[in-house]
Structures are given as structure tokens and as C-alpha cells.
Image (cartoon, helix red, strand yellow):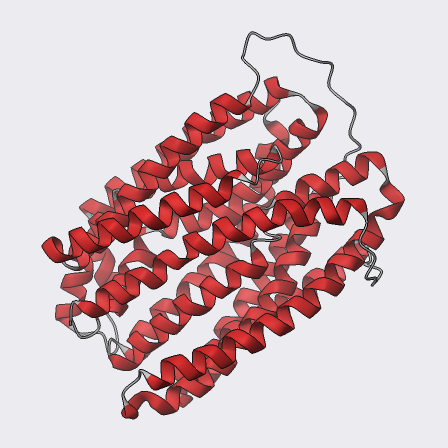
Amino acid sequence: MSRRSPLLRAVGRVAPWQAVSRGAAALLPILLATWFGRSAATDLYSLMAAVFVLAGSMVFACFQDSALIRVVLDVERDDRPSLPSLAGALLAYTLLGASVLAAVVGAAAFAVIRARTAPALGALVGPMSAGFSLYLFSLALRSLFSSLLAARFRFVTESVGMAIGSCAAVGLALALRGRGVAVMPFALAGGELVAAAALFGSLCQAGLRPRLTWRRSPALRRLAGLVVSEIGGAAVVRANPLVDQLSAQTLGIVGGGTMLRLSGDLGHAGASLLGPLFLSILLSHLAMAGARGDYRDFRATLARSLATVTLLLAAVAVVAGLLRGPLVRAVYGRGAMDAAALVRIADVLPYHLVGLAPLGALMVLARAHVSLGNSRILVGMGALNATANLLLNVILSRVMGLEGIALATSIVCTLVAVVFWIRLRGLLPAPGAPASPPVPVPVPVPERPA
């Protein structure tokens, strides 16, 4: 049996469920474009979505593809009976933190955005703020349960729960469409809540029923130190979509923010599928190799992953670029979306696609650092990402318009991927250095194929 077969077998088992999950998630922006086209109201929705996604990084960065997986594996190795208490403490603090964050961000967004919004759109701000606040809370719970299942190597179970939640979100969107774009955040929130409930049940069946407690164990304190760095880095990076939306609005193009968001969603669709299909599984395997101290296996897994991801996404980018016109019309060319907007989205799309392969490399390398417990690098990398994006947006948007904003994102992805790679080479032992014997780490019992 080859070294890579456990990773590939896991990917093969989750692929059908992730196809359902990501397909349903990708359907939502298509439905929004079909139902509501581009307008000042859809621009408001895009702006508020960027604001709350930025706030969401304050909760889901703590869990999804984070140092939590490495910490859980270390506890599995050193003090397995304490795992339910660790999970219970995480759940308790998540419930408290997510509630406070959702209330504060929702109130602040309502006050600030309503004051800056035209009176004709003012009535939309309140429902959107409430819906996105509920989304933040449910996202935190779902992300925690997803990460705990990944640490238990329950990838299929996690994917099934995500598929159920994504389908629930689409169903709610269909049911609520007649009430306008303002209620769409409630569809997103409902899908996350359904997924969280399904994942919690699966977590209990996997033998990790959380025991609610406020006890701050050494493992929890260690995780908190790593998470602070991950939150800082993620929060800075998540500011980029908000900066992009604000840059688009300064251009004075009606629906400019909507077209930029739709072209970005389409251009980065390959990378968004890559995350849940492959990267979460990759992080667990890299973290296991790191916990064992098996850097030979770590290097081999990372090298194969980088080669596969970059080549695959480069091929996707080339094909999508050649077929961009028919592709945009097939995805967005229905309902209220006008022909001029479709042409402009197709014009912007190649500038997103240029950065698709570097984005994939960036995502792999970031998880390699996290799997080694080097989460502290994320603050500096986030600052580099956000600063470069802001400067390039200012320069390129004046010269190229929406296309310049998309190109800025692609350039930044390339820059950050290169820096991640350089820093990782300095972190790992030299290939020819004497290796210590790997440390045994108990692996949870593999799940049965679904």
C-alpha cells in the first residue's frame, strides 16, 4: 500500500458528498443573480456579506483548518480521556463568544451602514443585519463541529453533514425568494444551523460528546495562543473582499460590486471546492506527520499536494478563460441579469483566473504551517496580504477599473504563496539531516465508507 493511499482514499470517499455540498453552495449566487440581477440592493447585499464574512473570520478561523486539529491529535497522544472536556470547553466558549460577536457586529453594521445608505434602501439594512448575525452564530458552531470531526478523521461524516446544510440553505432560499434579497441571509443562517445540528449528532456517535465546562486546561491555553495568531491573520485577510467592494463602489459603476463578486465567485470556484474536498483532509494528515515527527512523510505529502493542486487549478483556469463567454452566460445568463453585465463579468473573469493556481498553492502552504504549529506566521502574512491588496487596488483600479481590482487579488495571491514557501523551507529540517525516530500517535478508528 502506498504512502499516499490513505489520503487519496479519504478524498475519494468525500468527493461525492462534497460535490453535493459545494454544488448547492455555488447555486445560491446563481439564484441571486437570476432573481435579482444587479442593482443598488444587490450591491448592499454584497457589501454586508463582506462585512460579516470579515467578522466571521473571528470565529471560524479558530476552528476550520486550524491549529485545533494539531492540538487534538497531541491530546489524543498524551491524554486521551481529557478529550471530551476539551471539546466541552471549546463549545462553551464558542457559544459565549459567538453570541457576543453576533450581537455587537449586527448592531454596529446596522448603525453604520444604515447611516450611509440611501433612504430607499434603508429598510433592507435591518433584516440583513439580523440575518447575517444569526449566520455568524451558526457558522461558529458548525465550524467547531466540523474541525473536531476532521481531527477524528471522520471526513465522510463531516461531508454528509455539510451537504445536508447546503441543501437546506438552497431550500430556504427558494422558499423565501418572494420576500426579496433582504431575507437571503436567513437562508444562509438556516443552512449553517441544520449542518451544525447534523454534525453535533455525528460527533457524539463518533465517541466525542462534549462535556460543557469553563475549565481552561493546558491544551486549551495552548490552543488559545495559536488561535490568536490565526484570528489576527484571517481577520486581516478577510478585510480584502470588503476593501474590494469599497474600491468597486468608488468607480461609480451601477452594480459594479455585484459584478466583481460574481466574477470572483466563478473565477475562484475551483479553489473553493478544493478546500473542503482536499485541504481539510490534507491538514489532518500533515498534522499527524508533524505530531509523529515524521518530516520525510510530511515533505513527500506536501510536494505531491502542491504539484497536484497547482497543475489542476492551472488547467481549470486555462479552460475557463477560453470559454469565459459561454461559461458566464450559462451560469448567470438568466432572469434579471442584463446582457451588458454578462459581458463585463466575462471581461473581469480572466483577471481572477490568473491567480487561481497561486491561490491553490497559498492554501496548501498555509495549512502546512498550521499543521506544524506555526500559526504565528499568519499575522505577518495577513498584514502583507492586506497591505499589498490595498495598494494594488488603489493603483490598478484607477487604470483598469474592475479588472484592476481582480488583477490585484491575483498578484497578491502569487506574492503570498512565494513568501509562504520561503518561510516553510526555513522551518523544516534540511532533507539530509539525521531524522529522529517517529513518535507513535494513536489514529482514531477509520469510519466506514458512506
**Residue 306 in view in this figure:** yes
Image point 66% across, 21% down: which residue?
Answer: 294
Residue at image position (64%, 31%) is 6
Q: In the rendering, at what x and y percent does residue 57 appear? A: 51, 58
The image position of residue 220, as x and y in percent, is 75, 49
Q: Is residue 224 left or right of residue 111?
A: right
Name the residue rendered at 66%, 27% in the picture: 289
Q: Is 422 on the left-hand or right-hand side of 349? A: right
Q: Position of residue 199 (x, y in %)?
A: 69, 60
Above or below, 327 against 320 in this view is below
Percent coordinates x, y for residue 345 in the rendering: 20, 61
Q: Quadrant of residue 168?
A: bottom right
Camera sees residue 313: no
Looking at the rendering, in which quadrant would you find the N terminus? top right
- Which residue is depicted at the point 68% across and 22% down? 293
Q: Nearer the viewer, residue 184 or 44?
A: 44
Comparing 375 with 8, the one in front is 375
Q: Is residue 360 above or below residue 51?
A: above
Q: Toward the viewer: 19 or 140?
A: 140
Name the outermost residue toward the right. 81
173 vs 284, nearest the viewer? 284
Q: For the image shown, how many numbered marks are present on the structure?
A: 0
